[in-house]
């Protein structure tokens, strides 16, 4: 009985991006000559994708996890099969629903945002193709189908990022991203070749079954493949030091930024989630994800403090959040990473599409800010309240903190987050302090309940597709867990003590270095410009913050 709903789900998922491709490849010919038609068809195709995704989610609840193949052909050189297949599981259904929802929002926003632009029709064409390719990537059950969609999505996105070809910094950022992503494409392609040659399968669903026959350490080819997959994910996720292009693509239209930061940027984390059967068996690959993600969290958070641009701050936030997701995958908290993707995607789409209203917010009259600064003692007090609160609520939801040290780390990060709510109450005069403190404790309780409740829900929903959290093994894992706690504690102290350090010479020097992205991105920019020069009417210099400065002779 479950076979019929599963087949219907697979068909709905498969056809969801087809109208988007039709708009881009057929209707999009001469797009600038029939702008109104392009606008209507793009929005209609986005609606079709969302409806299909919703119906697929409904029918999936009546079916089961299964990989459905509609067509396949043999690849040369023992490279498996190239197939049109759909993986029907919790992860793909959730991601398809999420991306189609974000895609519709972006398409609807573009309807008015791009109104009157000279090349509005061309914009809608590339938007349709990018969305269609990304949805195909999500639903693909075939490794080669996934890789082709991976490459094509990046190529279509490049056309959107370089949409304003007359803006030098937009073109430069798009080219920087283009070159880095070609390295990611090659790395992933080689990794997939090694997997197929070793396991003799080109289907995602068959990888776990093929690995079941292997015990102990994986073959060297699979370990190399896992390293290449991690490299691809890091490059796609704009992790430090390859994050510069993400900050500088703000010259592209705002709907493109929303689509990138609320959807396509997650391809790296999604790749890791699809390759969990291999990544989870290679311990050092998980350690790499933790270390790279943690470094990006720390550096991007500090750089965000120096940003003077609204979109730039959001971009640094995305880089840090992507680091957080990769770190969660490295810790084995896979269902939490999916929850993070969903929540951050919705938030970041809203943040970018409403970024213009932030200016109005800062212009509006507000009460004067509290001039007092938090002390170390107040930070300790806030942690003393938030820590037992998080532990108590976590125990209510049955979180096995002692059995899974990774959950202890995430619990500590939660205490750091809610301690900032408590500091707002501790950092005011005595008048009204008790009432505000009780309010903040209540709010912190609600935040903790929401966090652990949603974590339990995501673990239950995704139990059929993703394994549960793994235990820390070895001294290195324990050291990484301790390092995570130290980094987040340090960021909390820096954020609270920053007003006191503003006039200190050390911080002023550090501010300059952070403002210039530690000069690493400037070096990458020079390499890209020497390899692929940007032709403009006037010479310019690209700063790390994405501004184009003309050089007057």
Image (spheres, grey):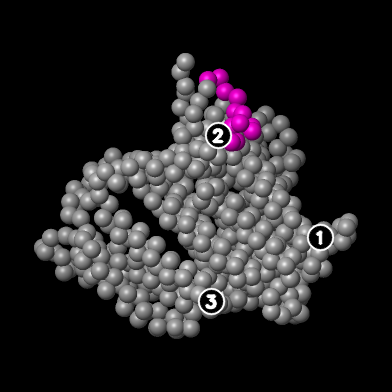
Which x, y percent locates residue 130?
65, 46
Q: Is residue 537 magenta?
A: yes
Q: Mark 3 points at which residue?
A: 474
* CA gap, disc 1 and disc 2: 41 Å
Q: Position of residue 273 (x, y in %)?
A: 62, 65
Q: Tell me which label, 2 or 3, sits earlier in the chain.
A: 3
The residue depicted at 38 percent of the width and 65 percent of the height is: 486
Label 3 vs 1, first from the N-terminus: 1
Q: What stretch is highlighted in magenta?
A: 527-538
Q: Mark 2 highlights which residue?
A: 526
Residue 2 locus on image (x, y percent)? 73, 78
Query: Which residue appears farthest toward the top when viewing the image?
Result: 553
Is residue 411 visible in this depiction of the protein? yes
Residue 311 is at least partly visible in this image: no
Please indicate whether residue 151 sits to the left or right of residue 387 in the image. right
- Local SS, label 2: helix
Q: What element carries label 1?
A: strand
Whether residue 422 is in magenta: the answer is no
The answer to whether residue 217 is above or below residue 268 is below
> Around disc 1, counting alpha carbons within 10 Å, would you say few (fewer than 14), some (14 to 19), or many (20 or more)?
many
Residue 276 lies left or right of residue 14; in this view the side is left
The label nearer to you, 2 versus 3, is 3
């Amino acid at each position: 009985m479950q076979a019929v709903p599963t087949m219907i789900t697979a068909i709905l998922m498969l056809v969801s991006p087809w109208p988007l491709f039709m708009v881009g490849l057929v209707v999009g010919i001469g797009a600038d000559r029939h702008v109104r038609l392009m606008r209507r068809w793009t929005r209609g195709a986005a609606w079709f994708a969302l409806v299909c995704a919703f119906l697929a989610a409904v029918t999936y609840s009546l079916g089961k996890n299964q990989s459905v193949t509609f067509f396949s052909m043999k690849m040369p050189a023992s490279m498996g099969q190239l197939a049109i297949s759909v993986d029907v599981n919790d992860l793909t259904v959730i991601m398809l629903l999420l991306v189609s929802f974000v895609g519709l929002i972006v398409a609807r926003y573009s309807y008015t945002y791009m109104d009157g632009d000279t090349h509005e029709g061309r914009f809608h064409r590339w938007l349709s193709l990018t969305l269609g390719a990304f949805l195909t990537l999500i639903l693909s059950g075939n490794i080669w189908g996934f890789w082709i969609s991976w490459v094509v999505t990046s190529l279509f996105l490049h056309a959107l990022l370089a949409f304003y070809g007359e803006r030098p910094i937009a073109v430069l950022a798009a080219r920087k991203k283009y070159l880095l992503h070609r390295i990611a494409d090659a790395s992933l392609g080689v990794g997939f070749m090694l997997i197929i040659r070793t396991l003799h399968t080109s289907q995602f669903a068959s990888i776990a079954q093929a690995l079941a026959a292997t015990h102990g350490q994986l073959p060297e080819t699979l370990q190399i493949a896992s390293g290449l997959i991690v490299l691809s994910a890091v490059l796609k996720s704009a992790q430090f030091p390859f994050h510069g292009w993400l900050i500088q693509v703000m010259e592209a239209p705002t709907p493109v930024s929303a689509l990138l930061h609320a959807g396509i940027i997650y391809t790296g984390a999604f790749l890791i989630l699809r390759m969990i059967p291999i990544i989870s068996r290679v311990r050092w690959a998980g350690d790499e994800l933790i270390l790279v993600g943690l470094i990006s969290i720390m550096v991007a958070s500090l750089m965000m403090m120096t940003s003077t641009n609204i979109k730039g701050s959001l971009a640094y936030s995305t880089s840090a959040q992507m680091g957080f997701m990769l770190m969660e995958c490295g810790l084995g908290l896979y269902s939490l990473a999916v929850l993070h993707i969903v929540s951050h995607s919705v938030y970041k789409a809203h943040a970018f599409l409403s970024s213009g209203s932030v200016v109005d917010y800062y212009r509006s009259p507000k009460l004067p800010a509290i001039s007092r600064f938090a002390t170390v003692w107040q930070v300790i007090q806030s942690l003393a309240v938030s820590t037992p609160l998080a532990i108590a609520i976590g125990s209510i939801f049955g979180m096995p903190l002692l059995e899974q040290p990774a959950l202890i780390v995430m619990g500590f990060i939660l205490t750091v987050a809610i301690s900032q709510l408590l500091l707002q109450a501790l950092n005011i005069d005595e008048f009204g302090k008790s009432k505000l403190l009780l309010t903040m404790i209540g709010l912190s309780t609600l935040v903790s309940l929401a966090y652990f409740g949603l974590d339990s829900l995501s673990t239950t929903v995704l139990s059929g597709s993703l394994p549960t959290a793994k235990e820390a093994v070895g001294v290195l894992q324990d050291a990484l867990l301790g390092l995570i706690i130290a980094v987040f504690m340090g960021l909390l102290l820096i954020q609270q003590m920053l007003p006191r350090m503003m006039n200190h010479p050390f911080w002023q020097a550090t501010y300059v270095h952070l403002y210039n992205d530690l000069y690493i991105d400037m070096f990458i920019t020079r390499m890209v410009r020497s390899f692929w020069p940007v032709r403009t009417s006037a010479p310019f210099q690209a700063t790390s913050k994405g501004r184009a400065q003309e050089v007057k002779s």
